[in-house]
Image (cartoon, grey):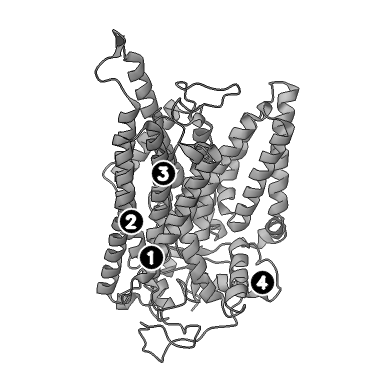
Amino acid sequence: MTDLAADPVGGSTTEPRRPGGVTTEPVGSRAPGLLARPWAARTAEAVVSVVAAFGFALLCTRIDVNPLARVGQVSGLAMIQKYAALVGLPVLAVLLYTAYRGSVARAQLAQRLVCAAVAGLSTGVVAGGIVVALNGTQWGLGGQEGDPGNLIGMANDMLRGQGVPGVYPPGFPGALAIWSKLFYGGVGGGGYALKDLQLICSALVGPMAYLSWRLLLRPFWALLIAVPSAILFLDPIRPYSHVTMIVMVPMLAGALRELRRAHELSTRSVVLRALGFGGSFGVMFLWYNGWFVWAAPGVFVLTMFVVPWRQGAARLKRALLFVGVTVLSAGVVASPLLYQLVKLGAQAKDRYAYLPVYIDPAYIMGWASDRSGRLTYHDWPWHGELAGQSAYTLLLLAGAALALGLGLRSIAVRTVAATLIGAWLLRFWFASHLAQDKAIQLYPRTTWIILYALMILAVLGLMFAVQRGTSWVRTLQRVEDGKPVAGAIRPAVTGRMVAGAVCALALFATMGASWSADRYMPTTDPKAIPDGKSEIIDMGADAWRAHILVNRDGKCPKYDPAGPTDCAPVNYKLKEYNNEPDKGQLWCANVKSEEWALVCGSKRPW
């Protein structure tokens, strides 16, 4: 009855099951009215989460401060928190009220909807912070420089009919080209369209993370994974990348769960489910494919173990049908990029080195981008007390130990562990060839997926520990004279515990989201302003660049630091990135000229 118990994917043995292993809902747990229907409740969760994310971001458009002054940034962040309190406190009050005064069914319905709302608000706050950071300019983060400029150039090339942009995933550039064509006149409007998509995609990360984990877990546990991961990994400059990673892992676990029980389904159901998973994987591959590369080795091996090779021909045929249709449909959808990878993949060398390339490759608990300010490999990362490991690291490892010790039979645990192992091995394979091949091959990005896997395992470990603990307590309970003994666990009590935990998680979400948004506020450090001369650039450079470009109406942004008539023009000739000849050496980003030989083993080209 308790939502602290594990979902069926966790292998719970304390709840009744239908034939075929599907766990039934406890008696009396159905929501009242229309929402008693499973599809209606799921739809309500999705709608609430998305509306909360978009609604809060729109609410933040009412904030009018100067984002290029630090006091303006502080006021803007404070107003976002005020709005979050005004929106969130009534929602949490409803959750607490139903937990204490409502029926179990109503309390569980409130819990589902409130968890969905908190997930949406978590990244809605981040998107709202980006709204404040870009107040007064119509350009997105990055303006027309760096990766944003590359994306605009790819979109322009698509609008000119030049097709898929090499080996780069074409999903987001294609969406950018379509949005630019529909609302900003095509070529030349990519920068304005980029701002829209940055805000939309940033707001959606929380709902997508939560809803993807709801395929496997109950609301509280899905929220406990979704909120920290969405806030930590969300990069509003490129929000399409990390959301693919966040969604891919539970989708892989869901697909392997369907594979494991394919023999229980009809042929039609197997084909339809395989088409759904395969199509989804294909779309995600086009959106951002790197995470599939890191997860592939471990998931491939796990799939070989999940396929029932020795359990009868009928069972094997159904499983192979699911695998075949999934792979085929994914390949068909992803074929444009797969073709480019086969055609040009061997020629695509990533030689862009930045701070995470220079540090100990075994460090995966934090991240510094190529806008790292004054950080160097001498003073980052900050090492913990126990062999360089922090308490945070030890907590994650303890949670992972619980997951492996108590829940290894769970397909979710197996999938996450396989993903972690595959990414770990590929990370050190590419890093070990760094000096010889002078190629990065994006290996530092495995930091994200390894850390994500550890966070998931920690939550799953806690979930299984709570499940096992409540099971033991229930076993020890005795009934005397037809009445439960004092201290017996009741559904109402566990419902209140969940409500309290959701409130605490909501507070973390607002604090963490404010931290995330603050990183992208326009820089106020004169030495970190991207003027073309400074070699020290921090995270605020991207918002700064958006404020120095002319708006669509021909006027300068409201808070242009150069003055009302001295903003930069639009570059209509932006081309696809990576179109220069490969020079066969590393590019040492954010390293002073005189230190290139020491850090990267070569002199700077000029």
Which residue shows up at 58% across the image and 68% down it? 176
In the depicted structure, whether residue 594 falls above or below residue 497: below
In the depicted structure, whether residue 264 falls above or below residue 52: above
Do tag 1 and tag 2 residues touch (Cβ < 8 Å)?
yes
Q: Which comes before the other along the chain, label 2 or label 4?
A: 2
Q: Which mark is residue 158?
A: 4
Q: Disc 2 designates what residue?
A: 87
User: Most extreme residue toward the top, as rendered?
Assistant: 481
Give the side of residue 300 with respect to residue 317, left or right. Answer: left
Residue sitting nearer the eye, 550 or 418 = 550
Q: Which mark is residue 59?
A: 1
For the residues marked 2 and 3, what is the alpha-carbon distance in whole angstroms? Answer: 18 Å
For label 3, the SS is helix
Residue 558: name its quadrant: bottom left
For label 1, the SS is helix
Give percent across and percent down for residue 333: 70, 53
For the residues marked 1 and 2, what is the alpha-carbon distance in whole angstroms? Answer: 10 Å
Q: Disc 3 designates what residue?
A: 223
